[in-house]
Amino acid sequence: MENNNDQDYIITLSENEGSSDEIVEITPTPLAKKKRGRPAKLSKALGKQKMINTTLESTDRAPNDSNPFKQTAAIIKPQTKFLLNDGEKCSKNYKYDGSTGNLSYHLVKHGIISPLKSGIISPMHTQSASNKNGQKEKELSTLRWILLTTQPLSTITQKAYIEHMYIIDPQFTVPGEKKLKMMIARSYGYNKEKLKLLLKTAQSISLTTDLWSSRSKHGYLGLTATWINKNFEIMDVLLVISYFPTPHTAKAITEGIKNAMQKWEIENLVVSIITDNRVNVVAAIRDLTPIKRLSCAAHTLQLAISKGLKVVENLVSRTKQLINFFFTQKQIERLIKVQKEIGYEEPLHLIQDISTRWNSSYLAWDRLIFLQYAVLQLSVNLSYSLISEEKTDGIRLKKIMIKDNEWELLDELCNILAPFEKATQDFSGNTYVTLSQMFPIITDLTNSLKPSDNSYEVLEDSDDNTINSDIVEEESSQIEVDYSNISEVLKNVKNKIYLGLKHYWAMPDEFGIMAALLDPRYKDLNFITDEETKVKIHSSLQIQYDQLKREMQQQTSTPPSPTISTISTTSTSSTPSMRSLHEHQERCQQKVKKVFQTKESSTSSSAIADEITTYFLLPVARENKNPLDWWKSKQEIFPVLSIIARKYLGIPATSVASE
């Protein structure tokens, strides 16, 4: 129901409650509160209006009853009558304790107050008020605020919010829940068609998907779409968040994604979909051929980390117990107090280690190490306390406290895991290119952990489905593990993570390498040592370039340039395994030098015979250069290649968007 109440109002009775004729002043009283023993009379937003020359007559009450609001079965409920200006009684009776809606309409009917002041606005008045005061724009702004900040619709019915809006703009009538729901329903249809048109402007689309559970344990399927538009801006939209009942079979997931693509009419635009490594999800995407499935880089990275942390799973479990000790209100307050006493600039809480959260162990340990002195000091304070409760807590804390060498080991483990946290953050962005960074970063991480003596074993455990194995803390914490040889423990951890990285990225993904090839920062592919892999990816790019060029020429009905035709024939007729990238670049270098003898601004796309050769002869961009800005400034020089770049650079490295 539309809520026109900016404030709460009450009808105040005259002191002479027993008289038959009572003059009533309707006075606005903001945020009126009910008094005990006497219910307040709430009214519509009638405005401040004194009813002069109008009399309200009470019906008879029981004698000697001082409380006009007291009701019994034998007594008629108190009612009110109107006396008009001419002295004639109105035939209408109104209850004192009833709804005020009918009373408002009746006041308007007799011309006592205007419709605008009564809050009863006719359609004509509504339209004029809306146009005059910008009511519609303010309602839309309210709706946007509700949606973009994910506020519950009930927010707008709260008295504090209504009072707040009244102070900001007394002329604004806050819409009610019903009206907002109607606005959402109307805007959904409009925006759905608008989004369909936007999706059709995409040259290619990449999806991300994830299955997750709400707090009430209900399953949901999320689906997002990402692409790069003609202005080289990343577009990221949410397509689906829908209830997804069990069982979450591969067939059900496939149907859910297919239905979403059909609903948004993007079946022919989707080139890839990024998911985690769960078996049912992998099988589901396999049935969506020719759509390419990419593993979420962040999730896969955590799988490799989990292999290394199994070496210290006892320490992981005991550290969890120590951290969980400080997650009761009593211990939180004690820890904060100790931090203030020993000079921490800003008191902090510990962070829980939750296996399903990426880099959770690193974040929890890093905070624990920072608060190490506060934790140790609190342990001493509790142990020597004369209060029995504190002394008992001190005994518990001392029992689960980790040893000195384990503190040192945790610190060293954080040094190992810190680069993985940064990599995860880099992979998870949605406002910049991420896929092209994946292999260069993974290569750097792998090389940093590679044993100098090559003394590593083959990774046997290939459990790709979970980030961390569930550890039973009670059992694991009771097992005594010797961590005295810290260097040996760290060596084993590094070895396991290294093997995990080699295992999960043993077969470089073509889409990931192609994205790096089309990123001017990584186009030299220095992170790849296998020359054959480089040749194959260059050949694949040439094939896509030739095909797209032919399609564009057919669409414009422009005959192909003889020079371009010659280059395309030469490129496609060459055998990939026999071609040398170095010789190919040397062959084209002299030809491209002539192009750059003139100014770049005057260089047209037709003057460049081979966009690919030109692209690779340009210097490698700096690390801090935005590849989208680079391509935007040069898309006139590379009209075909820039379209291919949009396809691959628009693919995200992770499925974070749908999670």
Image: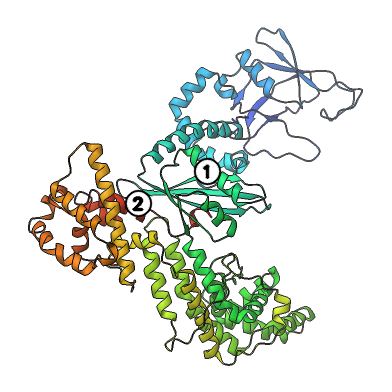
**Residue 477 in the image: x percent, y percent?**
70, 80
SS state under label 1: helix
Which of these two is toward me, 365 or 347?
365
Which of these two is toward me, 361 or 54?
361
Residue 647's disc number:
2
Q: Nearer the viewer, mark 2 or mark 1?
A: 1
The Cα atoms of the two marked residues, 2 and 1, are separated by 21 Å
Above/below status of 8 relative to 622: above
**Residue 535 in the image: x percent, y percent?**
29, 65
Give the position of the C terminus as an image quadrant.
bottom right
Above/below status of 115 relative to 386: above
Crowdedness near tag 1: few (<14), some (14–19) or many (≥20) residues, C-alpha within 10 Å: some
Left/right of residue 92 with respect to residue 203 in the rendered view: right
Quadrant assignment, res 74: top right
Residue ranking furthest to the right: 74
Three-letter amino acid code at the position of disc 1? Lys
Residue 258's disc number:
1
Which of these two is toward me, 414 or 292?
292
